[in-house]
Image (cartoon, coloured by chain):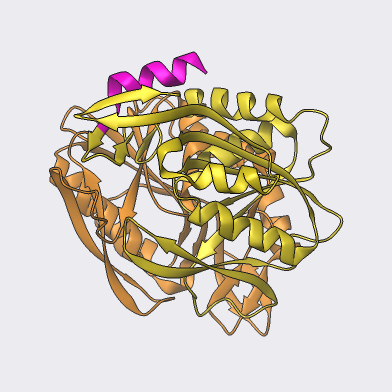
Chain colours: A yellow, B orange
Amino acid sequence: MEELKQRIQTEGRVIGDSILKVDSFLNHQIEPEFILKIGRELADRFRGENITKVLTIEASGIAVAMAAGLALGVKVIFAKKGHASTQIENMYTAPVYSFTRQEYVDIFVSAKYLTSRDSVLIVDDFLAHGQALGALVNIVEQSGAHLVGAGIVIEKQFQGGGKVLREKGMRIESLAMISRMREGKIEFG
Amino acid sequence: MEELKQRIQTEGRVIGDSILKVDSFLNHQIEPEFILKIGRELADRFRGENITKVLTIEASGIAVAMAAGLALGVKVIFAKKGHASTQIENMYTAPVYSFTRQEYVDIFVSAKYLTSRDSVLIVDDFLAHGQALGALVNIVEQSGAHLVGAGIVIEKQFQGGGKVLREKGMRIESLAMISRMREGKIEFG
């Protein structure tokens, strides 16, 4: 997606050799119209797959997942992090390690909203080491739903998460693939 | 907003006398088309106010804020919680107490995205004790931006947060006002 790559080049900030911040339109400030475009592009890549649910993880995935859900005409579930006292029902849960925060958190999805009758598209803003995506796949497996694949906005290819999951046969579509970040420069794969 | 009240009555689950769960369309599973309607209704209540930014807080506020931002044609900022190691720039920060989680967390907004030239509409899914909303108001004040008001999906009037902030002169529009929850029943104000 050319417009996305251009905006990553223009507005993205590289910190060290692995952190990319795109806070101006995706992860802190969001541009609703641009997010809708991203959602339509993700939806287009999975047309004809009879998707019934979009699944993402709070928080940065929500806007993009909503846009994909709108384009596909299906409901969106966002997995929650941690354990709030208001969570008392049957749920699927999986641990996820955050390299950013350097800690494990649990993510969970209520069993009510994801069942074996669903065909699920996972949507997320970033794919790096694949921790969050792996946990979402785990949750889909627990539910017995059919996993169609994952639609990702930005994949940091050099962190290897996408490779591992594709080798297991998973379909992953990333709108921007970054092969390397060095000395503040972003190279697309 | 009649459709919203009906869905709260039909799908909402009351836990104890203060917790309301609307996970089927707002807080865990979201219905994109219905969220767009909610966003348009919120935007309509503040038409003509020359809003330049919508401000919310992660995570449940994001979908509704994006819908309001779409309807108003402006960018959306979501305040982040905690302190990630990727946060290194100038920011506004405010503490917020979560009654659900029984702990304080900091929320923060990068100074880059909110300035004294902005006119801000705060949008959130719930207003209860007013902790989150108060912290967002604090952040708008730090930025020097003009605060237009707040658009809320569900206000739990009996928890008093809205009253305190309205007495300070703030304009708050809530699409559903709940005056009491008792024995599993929801009463609108």
Q: Is residue A2 magenta?
A: yes
User: Foreground: A105 or A31?
Assistant: A105
Q: Is residue B165 magenta?
A: no
Question: For residue B24, which quarter of the picture?
Answer: bottom right
Residue B71 % position (x, y): 52, 28
Question: For residue B140, which quarter of the picture?
Answer: top left
Side of B166 relative to A176 (left or right): left
| Farthest right residue in view | A117
**What is the span of residues highlighted in magenta in the rendered image?**
A1-13
In the rendered view, tell whether residue A71 sits above or below residue B148. Answer: above
Figure quadrant of the C terminus of chain B: bottom right
Residue at 43% across / 34% down in the picture?
A: B46
Side of B3 relative to A185 (left or right): right
Query: Can residue B172 be seen in the rendering of this structure?
Result: yes
Residue A179 % position (x, y): 41, 29
In the rendered view, tell whether residue A156 sits above or below residue B11. Answer: above
Query: Can residue B41 be seen in the rendering of this structure?
Result: no
Residue B110 % position (x, y): 21, 42
Residue B144 % position (x, y): 14, 39
In the rendered view, tell whether residue A108 sits above or below residue A187. Answer: below
Side of A91 relative to B141 (left or right): right
Residue at 63% across / 63% down in the picture?
A: B22
Please identify the dominant SS of the magenta region.
helix
Residue at 58% across / 76% down in the picture?
A: A87
User: Foreground: A182 or A6?
Assistant: A182
